[in-house]
Image: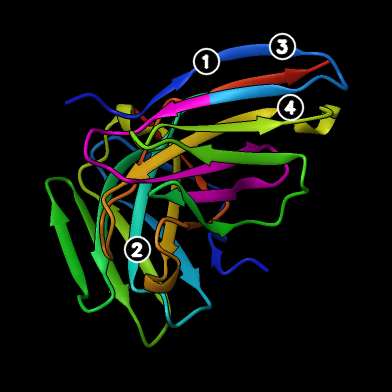
Amino acid sequence: DQQVKQNSPSLSVQEGRISILNCDYTNSMFDYFLWYKKYPAEGPTFLISISSIKDKNEDGRFTVFLNKSAKHLSLHIVPSQPGDSAVYFCAAYLGSTLGRLYFGRGTQLTVWP
Amino acid sequence: KAGVTQTPRYLIKTRGQQVTLSCSPISGHRSVSWYQQTPGQGLQFLFEYFSETQRNKGNFPGRFSGRQFSNSRSEMNVSTLELGDSALYLCASSLAGAQNTIYFGEGSWLTVV
């Protein structure tokens, strides 16, 4: 049962424009959400996170928005750069199962010049 | 400070053999978790250890096992290897407690032939 879903397997954006990656979840008890960036055969790199009690968190070019009523979060990258091209994973965890992340299937972002 | 360190990075094993992978967490992190990434199944949780005790376990057969030492270093073992065990095995560490970021190592790429 996929509790975290990324319904878009790929996204293509021109350099300098905004990239918006979406993520939906089914478990309303998730209390922390994270975004990771990943290159093939490497480990995921942490990008940004958000607590369930907040609706926005910003770090440089990255902003994550959380809509709890819709069980939806999104990652905005502005401006997008070619070096941002990678697979982005949305992940979540429950306070009761610390250390266990539930991952989406990932979205391949391609930023073209 | 040093990140999560996994060894070996790459290895090739034959069906029926067993393999042991090692993980050194970030200094001060007491929670260590393991994930398997395959093209078909995405990132799947194996198990998580905290203070030498397994706290959470994913849906994997008993051939997959792990342990954690008093210095928080962890190992995972896969016995009687099958072709389907070929994957990237990722170790992650975090501070104990809720809403802490989980950091990943570079992974151990296992090929079973």
Q: Residue at x 34, y 73 (%)?
A: A31
Q: CA distance from mark 1 to mark 4?
A: 13 Å
Relative to residue B28, is residue A97 drawn left or right?
Answer: right
Q: What amino acid type should be assigned to the residue bearing mark 3?
A: Ile
Q: Calculate the distance from the C-alpha at mark 2 to the C-alpha at mark 3.
A: 35 Å
Residue A80 within the magenta-colored segment of the rendering = no
Identify the residue shown where x is 33% and y is 48%: B102
Q: Are marks 2 and 1 on the same chain?
A: no
Residue contact at pointers 2 and 3, CB within 8 angstroms? no
Residue at image coords 55%, 64%: A5
Decide if residue A103 is on the left or right side of residue B113.
Answer: left
Q: Are marks 2 and 1 in contact (CB under 8 Å)?
A: no
Of residues A9 and A35, the one nearer the viewer is A35
Q: Which is nearer the N-term, disc 4 or disc 3?
A: 3
Q: Are marks 4 and 3 on the same chain?
A: yes
Q: Chain of mark 2?
A: A
Label 4's element? loop
Residue A76 position, x and y percent, is 28, 55
Q: Which contiguous range is marked in magenta?
A: B22-48
Q: Residues within 10 Å of mark 3 (few under 14, many from 20)?
A: few
**Circle 1 sits on which residue?**
B9
